Structures are given as C-alpha cells and as structure tokens.
Amino acid sequence: MDTSPIISRLRAAGCVFAEDEADLLVAAASSPAELESLVDRRVAGLPLEHLLGWAEFHGLRITVRPGVFVPRHRTEFLVDVAVSLAPPDPVVLDLCCGSGALGAAFSAAVAPRELHAADVEPAAVSCARVNLPGARVYEGDLYDALPSSLRGRVDVLLANVPYVPSEAVATMPPEARLHEPRVALDGGADGLDLARRVADGAPRWLAPGGTLLVETSTRQAPVLSGIFAAAGLTPRVHESEELGATVVTGTTKV
C-alpha cells in the first residue's frame, strides 16, 4: 500500500515520526474506512497510542485507553534503576500506576514476590488490571488505597508522579494536555506536590532497606533530594543522558 498520502497528512499535522505512525495505523485498520477514521483522528490530535490501543514501553506492548496517561519512553530509565537496586524476590508497589506500565516492565525483568499497584483514576485502574493480571490493583488516593497489611513490607516503590508545574501544563503538546487526565500531568506550583506526599508517607510503607523511586527533571532533582532527606530517606540522583531522564531514589535504613 502506498502510504505517502497518509505520511503527508501526518507530517503536516506535526507528527515527527510520520512514516512510522503511518505503518502502525495501516496495520491497525481492518478496512479502508477504518484507516481513514484513524488518520482523521490522529491528525485532529488524538494520541497515537489511544488510537492503537497500546503503547510500546520497555519492550512490552502496554494496553492504553482514552483518558489514561501514556507511558513515556524516558520513564524506562526509572525501571532500569529499580531493577538494578531490587533485592531478590521483592515486594513491589507501583504507585500512581496509570496503565501499570512500570509494574509490568519491572515484573518482566525481575519476578516479584508480590506486585501491588494503585491509582486515583478509575480508567487507569481498569487499564492497569489488564496489564498486571497477577497483581493486586487498588483505586484510591496514594497510600489511602492500600491495605494496612502492606505497611513496612515494600522493597521497591515505583512512583511516576506528575512533576510538571501547574503553569507549564498549558505549554505541553495538545495530545497530552487535551487527552490525558490533568491529575496525571499537574504537579502543583513547583511540580513537586505529589512527590512530597509520596516521600512523606514512604517510610511507613517501605521495608528496611527499601527504595522509593521518583522521576523528575534535572532542575527539580536537588529540591526533591532535600524532600527525600527530610522524610528520613537517603537520596541519590540518577541520570540518563541518552533518554534525557532523571530519577531520584530514597532508601530507608536497614
């Protein structure tokens, strides 16, 4: 099939990887009419992943649905850091889990003894239950969603919290700010509101020697390190120049 007309339309709409997207849309369509509909919606600004029904993340196809945050490739670095620090047979918590991409990717690399996940958005919880069939997935606000039996037992706490300052959300690409939940993007005045809450509660849920991992920006990393330290965690900053990613870890005392 000649995809050049589709590529031209996608490129004109600002799609940087128009050739790749055209191939994916063609493969996803079961008829010319469906293909036309998919291209129209992509040109109108809908996220490619929502149209396909999946996102590629850390070598996996993660189911994503309209209204659910699309996992970013830079966040693969958080998974890599978590895997490098995880003890054998860990108890893992994917907090603010969205689609459950982090929990799924971690579990594909290191088999956890237990995998738990939680999110405040019902659509995200539904999606995470598809991507994490062996996990216990809860709906609720951060630690309030969790069973008390998990307190003090979490070895690896993955928390991909929003860290975009409120005033910067308006500058994000339309496919993010118009089609992903605001709660998954807006981190408050300095972008660290949710990170503060997660860090403050983490020592009560982490096992001795357990680690909290949060993605942030290079600029925010020193402030977040201070937040971790104030919560009683030993902070460390990890950076990937290749992915343009920054992760701050905080570890409890053994």
Image (tube, grey):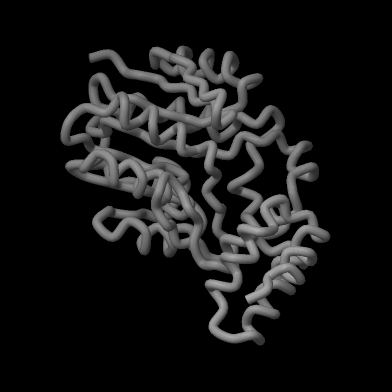
Tell me which corner region of the image, top left, top right, bottom left or bottom right, holds residue 26: bottom right
- Answer left or right for 149 relative to 21: left
Residue at 70% across / 66% down in the picture?
Answer: 42
Question: Measured along the vertical axis of the image, is residue 60 above or below residue 144?
Answer: below
| Residue that sits furthest to the right in the current view | 12
Q: Is residue 54 positioned above or below 81 on the image?
A: below
Up the image or down, 30 lies above or below 190; here it is below
132 or 232, which lies in front? 132
Give the position of the C terminus as an image quadrant.
Answer: top left
Q: Nearer the viewer, residue 99 or 74?
A: 74
Residue for point 38% across, 43% down? 94
Q: Quadrant of residue 243?
A: top right
Residue at the spot 39% in from the left edge and 32% down from the top edge: 80
Q: Residue furthest front?
A: 2
Q: Position of residue 81 (x, y in %)?
A: 39, 27
Where residue 198 appears, x then y in whole percent? 46, 32
Give the side of residue 147 with respect to residue 6, left or right.
left
- Relative to 16, residue 80 above or below: above
Q: Position of residue 217 (x, y in %)?
A: 61, 26
**Which quadrant would the N terminus be assigned to in this image?**
bottom right
Task: Please provide percent x and percent y for residue 46.
Answer: 69, 64
Please give the count of numbered marks on the rendered protein: 0
The residue positioned 42% from the left and 44% from the top of the image is 58
Pick the front one: 103 or 123: 103
Rendering quarter of residue 221: top right
Q: Is residue 111 left or right of residue 218?
A: left
